[in-house]
Amino acid sequence: RSIISKKNTIVTTDSVRALAMASRLGVMLALAAVVLLAAAGAAAGQSTPRPPNAQGPKPKPKPMKVKCTENRKENPYCFNRNMDCPANCPQSCYPDCNTCKPVCVCNTPGACGDPRFIGGDGNAFYFHGRRDADFCVVSDRDLHINAHFIGKSGHSGMSRDFTWIQAIAVLFDGHRLYLGARKTGTWDDAVEHLDITLDGEPVYLPADLIEGAKWTSSRVPELSVTRTKAANGVLVTVAGKFSVRANAVPITEEESRVHRYGVTADDCLAHLELAFKFDALTDDVHGVVGQTYRSDYVNHFDVRASMPTMGGDVPPSPPPACSPPTAAWRAMESAVETTVPRCYLSSLVSPAPAAWTAKVSCARSKTLLPCIWRVPVYVCMHAWLTSTDRNKQRTYINVFGTCNFIKK
């Protein structure tokens, strides 16, 4: 079991085998090291340093937290308890203090998007309307809500515009409330984009943009405006009548790319997401949303359709949903006594179909008192009024205000 070398050195067979195995292991380790070094060099050669101004994908914003801050006695368990907005509306929800759950603004009666409405019966439908036009949302004895639509021309093959609700105007108890999203190019959610006015005067919420900040009116004590977000979200409430939740939102670049909206650098199409709650509607209410609160309302939409649409792509003028209530129509036809001679109705809207005609008379008097008509008026799109003073002046009702007669 041994061999003798030329120098008479005795070497065992086991030693030879051990040396051979060590030699093979050394070769394999050397080859592995070479391969690793080559791979590292190739990776280093292929990697390109990121430019200093390059940015990765924007992280998704964390869900907004909401909580109940009122009626502690009625909701002791839910009071002041933080809740995360659901995944499908991470920045647009509010707390339901009765169930102690967050609710998406766009899952309640109201309007969102291009516009998708949810009626009082809980069914969703689309009402595209027309861009740069005003439509009747709710019209009742003591409440009227109009919506102003903005939009973009549809792409090739479409017979309608893309539309969104940019602003609403509310008439109640002789007051005018305006709530709208400002036109803007670059959207910054930390900057306020909401405009609110009451009877033509701006409503100034606290400038520190604190969620929960509240504004109340000295002239209309039942009216309050509360921030639901640090910016671009409010809850407008008229106690005993209605409340409106409104969020100002943009069309994002991703939305524009997917739906081919054609958003430009100077206008991100800021619009409103709206949720309505009504406390005192009559059974004679009308309007795109208002009619769905009637006890005799029948839903004729195909609820199985992916996009049940009211009035087709382009609704008639005036739309069937806005047939005037008999009592209000009689009020418009009746003569309105005033105390100012030769008064006329101020106008801010375009002419309406001739079918919407009523007469208003101005009694002649030598007194010079303001001439204001405060009779509740039903307005569906644009109502055409013709004064019967001696000059036979034709004027139009301002759908975003009360019917104010002024001296000529």
Image (spheres, rainbow, N blue to C red):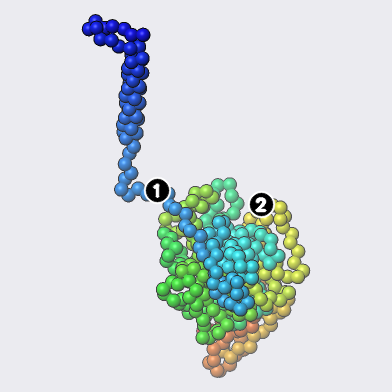
Q: Position of residue 202 (x, y in %)?
A: 47, 77
Residue 91 numbered tag: none
The residue lying furthest to the bottom in this view is: 366
The residue lying furthest to the top in this view is: 6
Q: Relative to 389, does residue 229 appear above or below in the rendering?
A: above
Q: Which residue is mark 2?
A: 306
The residue lying furthest to the left in this view is: 7
Q: Position of residue 36 (x, y in %)?
A: 34, 29
Residue 73 visible, this angle? yes
Instruction: Count neighbours of disc 2 (C-alpha within 10 A) and say few if under 14, some if 14 to 19, many if 20 or more.
Output: few
Residue type beneath disc 1: Gly
Left or right: 19 with respect to 126? left
Query: Label 1 to label 2, Cα distance in Å?
Result: 36 Å
Residue at horizontal 41 percent and vertical 73 percent from the top:
208
Q: Quadrant of residue 1?
A: top left
Q: Position of residue 382 (x, y in %)?
A: 61, 70
Instruction: Count neighbours of disc 1 (C-alpha within 10 A) and say few if under 14, some if 14 to 19, many if 20 or more.
Output: few
Residue at horizontal 52 percent and vertical 79 percent from the top:
198
Given residues 227 and 298, the one toward you in this image is 227
Given residues 103 and 295, the one toward you in this image is 103
Q: Which residue is mark 1?
A: 56
Could you tell which of marks 1 and 2 lies nearer the N-terminus?
1
Q: Give the SS element for disc 1.
A: loop
Q: Give the SS element for disc 2.
A: loop
Residue type beneath disc 2: Ser
Residue 397 visible, this angle? no
Residue at horizontal 57 percent and vertical 85 percent from the top:
372
